[in-house]
Image (cartoon, rainbow, N blue to C red):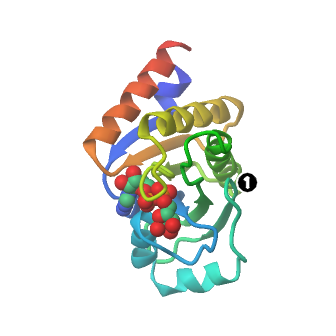
Amino acid sequence: MSEIDHRIRVHTGDITKLAVDAIVNAANTSLLGGGGVDGAIHRTAGPELLTECRMLNGCKVGDAKLTKGYRLPARYIIHTVGPVWQGGDKGEAELLASCYRRSLEIAAAKDCRTVAFPAISTGVYRYPKDQATQIAVGTVSVFIGHNALPETVTFCCFDQQTAELYRQTVAALAKGD
Ligand code: AR6
């Protein structure tokens, strides 16, 4: 079994329910909440999350910042800001890859063994799902190939169709190992 098969999981469901060391939030530069997965995370974590987020002074696109998980089963939340899709020639791919890389760096620095990502930028920010999935899986597999932590990365997909796309992308990459 390849390292990719072994350390990458694809899950269908709500990321706020996952009992992992850290979940990643697809936030905006204010870090003060919003819709989509961000809204769900703030609702479930509770108002203390917003209080901590207010002290972080926002976050740049492609960067990430850590908070506690509060009422979530996850110990930490890593808030990252994906790029808004603007046609693909505004550096979106590099910024999206940076979201995954920075989140993993922060997770490893906090000794997180298990981390779960949503499909960053593919909702309100309109990043095409197939391209975003290639970047997500590609960036995570390069990172775990060079780092012992996190041990396991879960791609948490909200629907079966997205999960199937991730499974195919992971399988294709694992075959090419
Ligand atoms: N668990 C897992 N995935 C989810 C959940 C959930 N509970 N809810 C939605 N998704 P989006 P973005 C999926 O729009 O495109 C917010 O307002 C969803 O199906 O949440 O990065 C922020 O504040 C999609 O595949 O994030 C920003 O302003 C994916 O999560 C903006 O949206 C990402 O969709 C960020 O937009």
Q: Position of residue 92 (x, y in %)?
A: 62, 44
Q: Residues within 10 Å of mark 1 (few under 14, many from 20)?
A: few
Mark 1 CB lies closer than 8 A to ligand 1: no
The amino acid marked with disc number 1 is Ala
* Disc 1 target residue: 109
Q: Position of residue 108 (x, y in %)?
A: 68, 49
Q: Split into 4 quadrants, where in the image is the C terminus?
A: top right
Q: Which residue is farthest top?
A: 176
Is residue 20 visible in this depiction of the protein? no
Q: Nearer the viewer, residue 51 or 129?
A: 129
Would residue 44 appear left or right of 120 to someone viewing this image? left
Asked if residue 138 is positioned above or below residue 162 in the image, the reply reads: above
Q: Image quarter for residue 17?
A: bottom left
Q: At 42% across and 70% down in the image, what residue appears?
A: 35
Ligand 1 quadrant in view: bottom left
Asked if residue 48 is positioned above or below residue 148 in the image, the reply reads: below
Is residue 176 visible in this depiction of the protein? yes
Q: Position of residue 156 (x, y in %)?
A: 40, 48
Helix, strand or loop status at disc 1: helix
Q: Nearer the viewer, residue 20 or 166?
A: 166
Q: At 51% across and 32% down in the image, what residue appears?
A: 134
